[in-house]
Image (tube, rainbow, N blue to C red):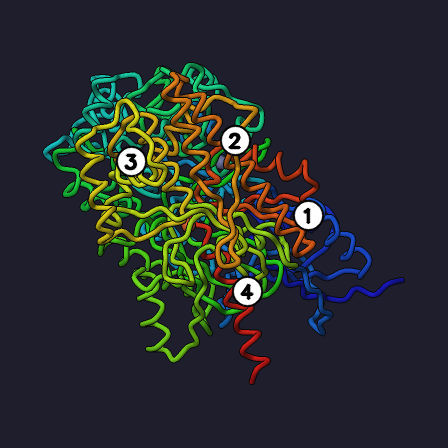
Amino acid sequence: MATDLTYKIEIRGIVQGVGFRPFLHMLVSAYGLCGRVRNTSDGVELYLTGDRERVDVLLAALRENPPPLARIESVALTQTDLPPFTDFRIEESRTLSHRHALISPDVGICADCVRELLDPNDRRYRYPFINCTHCGPRFTIIRDVPYDRANTTMADFPMCEACAKEYGDITNRRYHAQPDCCAACGPQTFFLDAAGARTEGDAIENARTYLKAGRIVAVKGLGGIHLACDAYDEAAVKTLRARKQRDERPFALMCRDLNAARALCTVSDAAAALLKNPARPIVLLPKRDPFLLPYCSENDDLGVMLPYTPLHVLLMGTDTDALVMTSANLSDRPILYKNEDALAALAGVADGFLLHDRDIHVCCDDSLLSVVAGKPYFIRRSRGYAPAPVTLPAGADGLLACGAEQKASFALSRGADAFLSQHIGDLKNFETLEHYTRQIAHFERLFDIVPQGLVCDLHPDYLSTAFARERASAAGLPLYYAQHHHAHMASCMADNGLTTPCIGVIWDGAGYGTDGTIWGGEILFGDYAGFTRAGSIRPIPLAGGDRAVKEIYRVGAALLKDIQAPLPDGCDADKYAAMDSVLKAGVNCPRASSIGRLFDGVYALLTGRETVSYEGQAAVLLETMAREADEGYPVCIAEENGLRLFDTRPMLAEMLKQKRAGAAAGLIAGRFIRTLADMAVELCVRVRADTGCKDVVLSGGVFLNRKLLPQVIAGLAKKGFAVYHHQRASTNDEGIALGQLMIGAAQRDKDGKRQ
Ligand code: ZN
Ligand code: ZN
Ligand code: FE
């Protein structure tokens, strides 16, 4: 007969805040074993008394079928001399010096909680903070590890007797649910009018009354405060736009349920699954009719999410189909998340405030994804995903990657785990920079990472570069520089687990090149350790530098001057003539080999539009109007000093000739996109001829374009390439930090070998 010994089992991964210990309790009971379990700052520590075979079967079952939200990274078993346990209990958490626990992202409300929320006989009927072991706030309320109520913003709300009973009852679905609460003991909502005075009556009903009357309400949610109004009320949405001074950027919507989303958009099965994912991201969906809700989005798609907190479920009720739900922030500052800040900053913007007294410790914007080839494709990886780690193809231990500047993010590495920050914003204002540095400190504490080196962009003027330089020199740490497009490429390689040299098609708006000029239409060849620039596009002089990003006619004028073609209809002759002389003088006309700028210039010439209100708008509008084209314009590749350059001139000349002949702008736009895809294929074929490499990674903000991306993928696949796009990180600058980690690790290796 086998002797019963006591084993210690250490489990690491996302094992806290996901119902792991209750799950273990049930599993252990089912196997008739005894022992103890507790959370540590490393993960979960389990002691089991029993014969080894039975213990192994139990652990196999656990690995096979963990609780739905858990992610087991490792299970380590050791034999102990402890006396046998005779029962099973959950013990107090223990704080270790090393913190290896993973922290769960926030989880959207589960179906069981929705059912109870709407059940008049349930004791939490209409209680807006209902949650359970499988849903509710996590990352945004956690102040410290281990994940226990005392270390969250729920610490201010001691459990009532009824809640405490559930919490301690193994058969209850709130067993050890840290944020468990009810109306008697938990947080409360309240509604304030425009003047900040509390109103009588039910807070959520008051908010609903305001929304129905076409007013704008600030709503405190999970990761921050939204501004909400009825999405079908054109006047209300336009008022919101005016008050928020929000240019023409699309607003996200919250739809009551899938049917309400289907009334507006085509929802594929993959999109429906993503909408209902526990992360509850905003999903970009094609409009049913391109003219639906044009005041919410001028494009042919809408960003839609489903209610993800009980408060949202109650706010939508049974009669509100869709609300605009846009992050409450002013002029590109971080999302507001404190009551007092919201009241001050949104005076004159919101007509009412639906707030509550549970603090948000960490603000976290909604995530934004689209569906590409049936799979989720990140545009913004934030609430519901952060701070779950992305596994790296090779260790990059102990590095802090500082990201880019717009769509700033950072990443910390521990072993093969990369912890990517939530959405931070554009680092140009003081508040965002402060938010960025605060979040870095918070992540370092939560994950117990003391960086041994820093990685930053090559751009001398990025604030993230300045931050990295200061910190590295203050702490005496090595600083590694990663060229912007190399980092994009490394990011897509790491994202797909690639470790051997690749060809990178890296297209974006702007990044600092190794020659000091602006790059953005790059074909690179290399790996994490280094790269060569194998191809690019004919540089475009930007009259007035950065001004050309918003005043896109400046780019149009440069393209036109380059081919000496007559001014297209719709373009302002005086403005173009003025630009012509600026370009001739050549003062403050930096050259940019950027696909993003090429989109801007082409859009300006096709439509006569002179300015855009945000970067990338012209590309989105051009994508919207483009019709599918089977044939592109001529692809002409020139060679300059060993660098292959796509010569834009034959394409532009042909394009404008067609326009003069009266061809529809949508047709020309479609052929332009096709030409870019052809050009990518042509350049990759040439690089393959030199290098024999058949793996191509696609990265950079231009690959958010959902007409261009599939054409590039299909074109390359047809030529026998293995093509990879992003799966777990964003293709835009938010994804840069992931690539920086790998580049930093490779440089550190090289330095180590040299010594
Ligand atoms: Zn639940
Ligand atoms: Zn209670
Ligand atoms: Fe970029």
Foreground of the two, 211 or 301: 301
Viewer-side label of 3, 1: 3
Instruction: Name the disc covering residue 226, or none.
Output: 3
Q: Is 160 left or right of 376, judged from the image as shown?
A: left
Q: Nearer the viewer, residue 58 or 629?
A: 629
Is residue 217 shown left or right of residue 447? left
Residue 704 location (% of width, % of height): 46, 38
**First-in-chain label (1 vs 2):** 1
Q: Is residue 27 above or below residue 237?
A: below
Q: Secondary structure at mark 1?
A: helix
- Residue 753 coordinates in the image, percent (x, y): 59, 80
Residue 674, numbered circle:
2
Question: Dot 3 surroundings within 10 Å: few (below 14), some, or many (20 or more)?
Answer: many
Disc 4/disc 2 C-alpha distance (Å): 31 Å
Q: Give the Cα distance between marks 1 and 2.
A: 56 Å
Kind of residue at disc 2 = Arg
> Spatial distance from mark 3 to mark 2, Cα to Cα?
39 Å
Residue type (three-letter) at the residue carrying disc 3: His
Near mark 4 (Cα within 10 A), the count class, few <14, some 14-19 or many ≥20, is some
Three-letter amino acid code of the residue under disc 1: Leu
Between residues 386 and 505, which one lies in front from this camera angle?
A: 505
Q: Which residue is mark 1?
A: 27
| Nearer-N-terminus badge (4/3) | 3
Question: Is 314 or 14 nearer to us in this picture?
Answer: 14
Choose mark 3 or mark 2, whichever is in front: 2
Marks 3 & 1, CB-CB < 8 Å contact? no
From the image, tell me which residue sits under label 4.
530
**Sequence-first disc among 4 and 2:** 4
Residue 104 visible, this orientation: no
Residue at x-position 71% and y-position 65%: 77
The disc, 3 or 2, on the residue closer to the chain's N-terminal end is 3
